[in-house]
Every structure is written in structure tokens, then in C-alpha cells.
Amino acid sequence: TRSTRPQRLLKVVQKHATRGDPQSVISAIDHFCRHSEWAMNVGDEKGSILDSVVSELNPEKVLELGTYCGYSTVRIARLLPPGARLITLEFNADYAAIARQVIAWAGLEDKVQLVEGASEDWIPRMKEHFGIETFDFVFLDHWKDRYLPDTKLMEDCGLLRKGTVLLADNVICPGVPDYLEYVRNSLSYKSYYFKSHLEYTKAEDGLEKSVFLG
Ligand SMILES: Cc1ccc(Cc2cc(O)c(O)c(C(=O)NC/C=C/[C@H]3O[C@@H](n4cnc5c(N)ncnc54)[C@H](O)[C@@H]3O)c2)cc1
Ligand SMILES: [Mg+2]
């Protein structure tokens, strides 16, 4: 039977990227998605904004919701200081299997813990299962109707501290209206919109950076 797009993306990484070189993995995926098959990675343009937010923050404890093929996982993990940890949640077993191999090809498996399961099941278990007190940085890029409930769940589980940064992909396209309304109107967040484009296209999209105020 025909291969899947994530399988073809992994093949491109293994053919064109250099083992242990995260930038070559990122470039191989971006070239494939721009010239062969579009895929829902955060992409190079929004990815540069993601890079700048991570570099400025230098986070020790990072959570990513929605691994997909591991593109943003690699983007974030490559910038983390030694000893820092990224936990990424992915409930599709096929995508998780591809992402593990992409992350390994980039040589970042020591910084990344890919957990196969649903965010709503694992967010409440972060403290007892992973010994996480609070996260410094959270990247939201999973199903768009889960951004708001999962943010409230992280608040309720005490996983956010004064200064924790949430960065949400796709706040315009596909759009997350309920999440935007919440972080932009809640007294518990200071929110900023980074205007950009939907990955590999000319359509408008953007990232929303929201700082939890405690
Ligand atoms: C109209 C329209 C359609 C599509 C686009 C294009 C477009 C552009 C984008 O950047 C996008 O991020 C998306 C998008 O839909 N992303 C959803 C991404 C899900 C991944 O996360 C996984 N997952 C989903 N919920 C959970 C969950 N609870 N726990 C654990 N993993 C979860 C899934 O298993 C997938 O691996 C779409 C633009 C406009
Ligand atoms: Mg996205």
C-alpha cells in the first residue's frame, strides 16, 4: 500500500539530512514541504519566531502539545541548554513512531521525552510521573479545540508559574478564537501577537505569546 506523508517526510530526512545535525533535519523537512508535499509543521517563517522566543527564554522545562513529525520538537530542543528537558505529547502512534526517528536523526533524543498519549490524560500526571514542578515554556500545536481546555487544565494542575510562556501556533489559520479571547482578556496573562504566514504559504497566520502572571 501507498506510504503515508509522515513516512515520506522521514525518508527525506534520512536521505538528505546529516545524522546529529538538527539544522540539516529542519532544512530537509522545509524543502520537502515547500517543493514536494505540504505538511502541518510550524515551518521556517513561524519557526524563526519560535526560535527567538525559546532563545530569549532559555527554558529548563518545556512542554509541547502535538508532536506530529517532530519538526518543532527538533527546532526547540536544538536551542535548549544542557540539562534542559522537553516533554512532547502525541496520541497518534504512527506519528509518534515517525517523530521518534526524526528526533533521533537530529541527535536530540537525550533532551526529548516523547510521550505517546493524550494531553488531557498526561497533563494531570506531569508532577507525579515526571517530577515536573512547573513548566518554563509550553508550545501549543495540537488540535485547535484543545488549546483552551488544556491551558485551563495546566493552570488547575499548578503547572504554570509567574513568567511561564505559552506560545500557540495557528491562532489565525485554522484559528483558535476561544483560546485567543481567553488569553487576551484574562487578567492572568499578558499576550502578544506575532503576525506571520501559514507554513509554506502566503495565507496569514500567527503565533500568540502569552505570559502567565500567576
Ligand atoms: C482550515 C485549515 C485546515 C488546516 C490548516 C493547516 C494546519 C496548519 C497547522 O500549523 C496546524 O497545526 C494544523 C492542525 O490541524 N494541527 C493539529 C495538529 C495535531 C497533531 O497533534 C496530535 N494531537 C492532537 N490532539 C492531541 C492531544 N489532545 N494529545 C496529544 N496529541 C494530540 C495529532 O495526532 C497531530 O499529530 C493545521 C489550515 C486551515
Ligand atoms: Mg500548527
Image: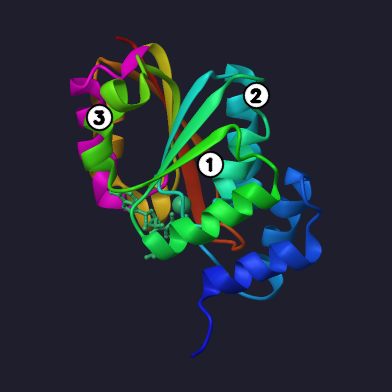
Q: Which mark is residue 101?
A: none
Q: Report if the CB atoms under discs 3 and 2 are less than 8 Å apart.
A: no
Badge 1 is on which residue? 195
Amino acid type at circle 1 is: Lys
Q: Using a 10 Å C-alpha cutoff, classify the residue at mark 3 as few (fewer than 14 neighbours), some (14 to 19) or many (20 or more).
A: some
Apparent side of residue 103 relative to residue 186 in the rendered image (left or right): right
Q: Quadrant of the C terminus?
A: top left
- The crowding category of the residue bearing disc 1, from other C-alpha atoms within 10 Å (few below 14, some 14 to 19, many at least 20), is some
Helix, strand or loop for disc 2: helix
Where disc 1 sits, the SS reads strand
Rendering coords of residue 189 (x, y %): 32, 19
Q: Nearer the viewer, mark 3 or mark 2?
A: 3
The residue pinned by badge 2 equals 55
Question: Is residue 141 visible from the viewing direction of this image?
Answer: yes
Mark 2 packing: few (<14 Cα in 10 Å), some, or many (20+)? some
Choose mark 1 or mark 3, whichever is in front: 3
- Please tell me which of labels 1 and 3 falls first in the chain: 3
State the CA–CA distance, disc 1 to disc 2. Answer: 19 Å
Q: Is 71 on the left-hand or right-hand side of 162? A: right
Q: Residue at x 66, y 20 (%)?
A: 82
Q: Quick check: marks 1 and 3 in contact, CB under 8 Å?
A: no
First in sequence: mark 3 vs mark 2: 2
Q: Give the percent coordinates (x, y) of residue 141.
A: 42, 46
Residue at image point 73% right, 44% down:
22
Distance between the alpha carbons at the discs numbered 3 and 2: 28 Å
**Residue holding disc 3:** 125
In primary-sequence order, the first of circles 1 and 2 is 2
Question: What range is drawn magenta here?
Answer: 140-161
